[in-house]
Amino acid sequence: MPGVKQLAGRKELMAGGHRACAGCLPMTAMRQTLLTAGKDTVCGCATGCVEVVTTIYPYTAWRTPFIHSAFENSAATISGAEAAYRSLRRQGKIDKKINFIAFAGDGGTYDIGLQALSGAMERGHNMLYICYDNEAYMNTGIQRSGGTPKGTATSTTPVGKVVPGKKEFPKPLTEIMIAHRIPYVAQATPGFPKDLSDKVEKALAIDGPAFMNILTPCTRGWRYPMEESMEVARLAVETCFWPLFEVEHGKFKVTRKPKEKIPVAKWMEGQGRFRHLFKEQNKHIIDEIQEEVDRNWAWLLKREELTQS
Amino acid sequence: MGRRLILTGNDAAAEAMRQIDPDVVAAFPITPQTELMHKFAEHVADGDVKAEFVLVESEHSAMSATVGAAAAGARAMTATSANGLALMWEIVYIAASYRLPIVMPVVNRALSGPINIHCDHSDTMGCRDTGWIQLYSENAQEVYDNVIQAVRIAETPDVLLPVMVTFDGFILSHTAEVLDGLEDNVVKKWVGEYKPKYSLLDTDQPMTFGPLDLQDYYFEHKRQQVEAMRNARAAVKEVGKLFDELSGRSYDMLEAYRLDDAELVIMALGSTAGTTKVVIDELRAEGTAAGLLKIRCFRPFPELEIAESLKNAKAVAVLDRSVSFGAPGGPVHKEIRAALFGSSGVGLVNYIYGLGGRDVSMDHIRSVFKDLETIAVKGTPTDNIRFLGLRE
């Protein structure tokens, strides 16, 4: 599997000059994914930041084939393209190996696109679905999604006199995809590029559907200085808020075990969206989040132990 | 050599699909479309077709997968009815805007609510402005012929628009008729191989499909769609002529039945046109100058041909199997009225009929012709939007 230096030497498939914000990690995730996947990759993307910033007609930043159709149907659209490929290949009309990747944000995956994703995975298409999870509907102005952490201030869960941000824990999307019993499920983040790239390579090499949930901090929505994006991404891993792991044919493997498990508050304190939680009356919410992180981490390690033996 | 077949409308569509043998079919079951897909599934199970059959989890995904497949250079099809079409709605527009020559049989059924599985045209009439070509079928023969023609119409280079082939739920979809089928190799040769200009699978020449199209270009792209729909008029006619040469069955945008000297004219779409023809024969025997102008192609709409065809008529009744709430009449009537704007003399009346599968009998049609006798003398009545077969 290629190292970061080798990847950096490859031809860029995501052209510069697109309209993403400085410090946008979803775009870094795209770049890392495409460098790994190579040019023979058909990409699709749901409506959202990535689609908007990369394809303002008459320009496109995609040097691979690309299709955007709507918000909730990235998985279904790419499943159709993959079906076409299978059909044409069977008829001998095409023979080269082509990868199929459907992208969508957390809104397009946890929420409106969940049905299409579930269907495409269940049908067994040979495709990789990547959720670039920036934990809210950023493109439409930072509204809460099913993937938004508890306590987060968003446009639709503002911090008011009586409500301290989002009330609910996020939907465990990666777990839902593991429960689909597809050949490959993984979590990654561009903060660990080699880990991300290795997982993309593995996901594409595996025959059948694969899913990756990639945490992609958003400088605007999370409210931290744009130059800190990579650090924020890494800290999410080092606090075990966003564990890096993969599930290959049912076998769990934690791909990064922090030497020292940092309290989740250290990750949260740098982000404006959590600022109100550090007030005395809201600190119990941070405790609840820490408990949830600890529980999830312990359960993850347990499952690794159970399935690797 | 043709083949004499006994098929339901659904089976006729499935038979045409088997012979067209598209690369990808993506579908989700909904009554009364179900048996069409059952039949096609049997062809897949028996290895009769090369199509990749994608059994999606909703109609929204059916149309999405069909769009993805068509963008990837496949000849792609789906089929649906009523609520299924409504769920697809968003992507139905996108398919046309992306200029993907998809063919979709739609088995006409009433939209909910309340839920009803029987025929009316509220589903396809509701998406008359989606940018799809719409062909309505009178019987199983036309279902079969229209599906085959739809492929060539859709793929005409200066058209590249998707086509809906509609037929009446249960009335046509579930009743068996005798029809003439073409030989497999004849259909295969006639529809030819699909050679798309652009494909997602051409990774050496990467294309972006569906970019964000803002104030700068969106309007121009819509204008191109308008032009494509204009070009579709010639394509529907030309393909109809070519199909006549192939099969001996001619097709145009309209079909006139005993219309030349008709004074009292009914305009209808779908199976009701067949019922009307029978009544016309009876009335003619009784000495009434009755005729039919059937609309086969509702999109694009043949307004000039309609005005020309009705120039000798004294009274015209437009039968609408759907309702356009708050509008001046049913959707077909409104367009006929627009087509006849400025034509003097003809009395025009609209009948909303057959919603939710309410049967339309020969007596109903006869009563319409009876009304037309009065309208021919007195002109367009003040109560020009009426209901046929309704208890009030």
Image (spheres, coloured by chain):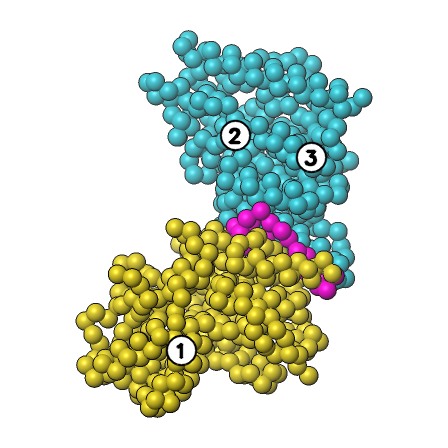
Chain colours: A cyan, B yellow
Q: Pointer 1 indicates a residue of which chain?
A: B
Q: Residues within 10 Å of mark 3 (few under 14, many from 20)?
A: some
The quarter holding residue A279 reads top left
The residue identified by callout 3 is A181
**Label 1 sits on residue:** B276
Left or right: B285 in relation to B50: left
Q: Quadrant of the C terminus of chain B?
A: bottom left
> Residue at the right extreme?
A309
The residue depicted at 45 percent of the width and 72 percent of the height is B271
**How far is mark 3 from mark 2, CA to CA?**
21 Å
Residue B53 magenta-highlighted:
yes
Q: Nearer the viewer, mark 3 or mark 2?
A: 3
* Residue stretch rendered in magenta on the structure: B47-67
Distance between the alpha carbons at the discs numbered 3 and 1: 57 Å
Q: What amino acid is found at the position of numbered circle 1 in the picture?
A: Thr
Residue lying at 56% horizontally and 17% vertically, measured from the top left = A292
Looking at the image, residue B351 lies above or below residue A70 = below
The answer to whether any part of residue B318 appears in the image is yes
Taking the view exactly as shown, the residue that stands out farthest to the top is A280
Q: Is A96 a magenta residue?
A: no
Name the kind of residue labelled 2 in the image. Gly
User: Mark on residue B5?
Assistant: none
Crowding at dot 2, Cα within 10 Å, few <14 / some 14-19 / many 20+, comes out as many
Query: What residue sits 55% from the left and 18% below the top?
Result: A267
Which label number is shown at residue A147?
2
- CA distance separating discs 1 and 2: 58 Å
Q: Residues within 10 Å of mark 1 (few under 14, many from 20)?
A: many
Residue B344's quadrant in the figure? bottom left
Residue occupying the point 52% across, 26% down: A170
